[in-house]
Image (spheres, helix red, strand yellow):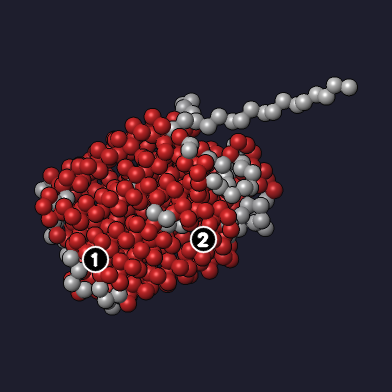
Amino acid sequence: MIAAVLGRVRGGTVRGLRWWMISLIMLGAVVNYLTRSSLAVAAPTLLTELNITTQEYAYITAAFQGAIMLQPLCGYVLDVIGLKYGFAIFATAWSLICMAHGMATNWQTLAILRGLLGLAEGSANPAGMKAVSEWFPAKERGLAGGVFNIGASFGSMLAPPLVVWAILHYNWQSAFVITGALGLVWVCAWLLLYDAPKRHRRLSKDEAEYIAAGQEDHLAGDGSKPSIVSILKKRNFWGIALPRFLADPAWGTLAFWVPLYLTTVRGFELKDIAMFAWLPFLAADLGCMFGPVVVLALQKRGVRLINARRGAFTLGAIMMMGVAFVGYVDNAYAAIALLSLAGFAHQTLSVTVITMSSDLFRRNEVATVAGMCGTFGNLGLLIFSLLIGTLLASVGYTPFFVSLAVLDLIAAVLLWTLVREPVPEPAQPLSIQKT
């Protein structure tokens, strides 16, 4: 449905196949974030039945965040062996690991499984950015990145009602079996339908030419393996990695800690979580599309692409200031509204900075760069999550909500300070031999 609508908006059937491809990988992201969010929704029940403390739960989430920092490894594998089969391997692994969660009997086993899950699921963001860089011209990459990132929000949004339904009708173990099985179904569809543009049998000549004509020649790449050392030496890498380090804790807070916050602080029961905990992620879906729309609007007014992306990120950072007041409002529904604003604002800026890897680096480097930036984002999330687990009993949630707003503003400053627009390499003059 999304692909059909976007195909009409962007120019009909001639330009439609790439929207089907990004919709397919978006569904993969839905399953990815559904499986990773299942634990947070099941946590109030699971922690009680397995006698797990808040500190031990922080260790469990930290195991996931520590392992997902190996995203550069995932990105490197995807760049080397290709997106189709590389992503299928990772998706099969995370689906089976998620199903194995149902056999856990203590927090140590859950921590090990979450670590393995994080390693496999770290492939999603590099895979999405690689698909965007291969299938889309520059002017459409922001919108394509927004469509892909809808998967993250929608998967997180789908988790509360699905997991609560499974717990109420069966048990908490069944929630992990069901979400993992959905991943295996998606892998079958992926292997059947996806391929790279140069090998896809249904890609028309007109669309192939349209994609190629809209991509920057200086980002084409030469087919060589990406050099991590070379990437680390580039200013633009740090220009997007450090803002992600500061901004990504907001998503981790929404995904891993909000259900517990609503239960312990706001007095929500399991059915209440099913009814309300998905709202911040619905707002996040809208933010995924709002960010690219802001970029396109700025470009129409003469703003260059990189500056337009920085402008959209800054707008998202300003809106994120609302999350600072979550702990100060008395009404629980007002808190939900502010958390929903945070979801909208975070995805507005997140999809913008994530897409910049395809604007600043060669196509044979994009998945590796996206993975490396993801490592920094998840490192920030890991540190933030450990701090919550350690200090929650003494300081409560409010200081953490305030810090999320401050961190995003600092991230915007770094994005403007560090990132430089790439300059196309000048054409080499022809040498003339004297006779």
| Residue sitting nearer the eye, 397 or 228 | 228
Residue 65 appears in the picture as rendered: yes
> Of the numbered discs in the image, which one, if any, rests on residue 35?
none
**Residue drawn at point x = 38 percent, y = 73 percent:** 99
**First in sequence: mark 1 vs mark 2:** 1
Horizontal and vertical percent position of residue 404? 25, 43
Q: CA distance from mark 1 to mark 2?
A: 28 Å
Indicate the amino acid at tag 2: Phe
Farthest residue to the front: give it: 229
**Residue drawn at point x = 27 percent, y = 70 percent:** 108
Indicate the amino acid at tag 1: Ala
Up-down: is 151 above or below 171? above
**Residue drawn at point x = 63 percent, y = 52 percent:** 197
Element under disc 1: helix
**Are the residues tagged 1 and 2 within 8 Å (C-beta)?**
no
Horizontal and vertical percent position of residue 305? 49, 32
Horizontal and vertical percent position of residue 260? 20, 60
Q: For the residue carrying disc 1, how many other residues have a C-alpha within 10 Å: few (<14), some (14-19), or many (20+)?
A: some
**Residue drawn at point x = 20 percent, y = 74 percent:** 49
> Of the numbered discs in the image, which one, if any, rests on residue 43?
1
Q: For the residue carrying disc 2, how many other residues have a C-alpha within 10 Å: few (<14), some (14-19), or many (20+)?
A: many
| Residue sitting nearer the eye, 164 or 398 | 398
Along the horizontal axis of the image, is 431 left or right of 240? right
Horizontal and vertical percent position of residue 178? 37, 72
> Of the numbered discs in the image, which one, if any, rests on residue 87?
2
Residue 144 appears in the picture as rendered: no
Element under disc 2: helix
Among the 4 quarters of the image, the one containing residue 435 = top right
| Residue sitting nearer the eye, 77 or 317 | 77
Farthest residue to the right: give it: 435
Up-down: is 30 above or below 365? below
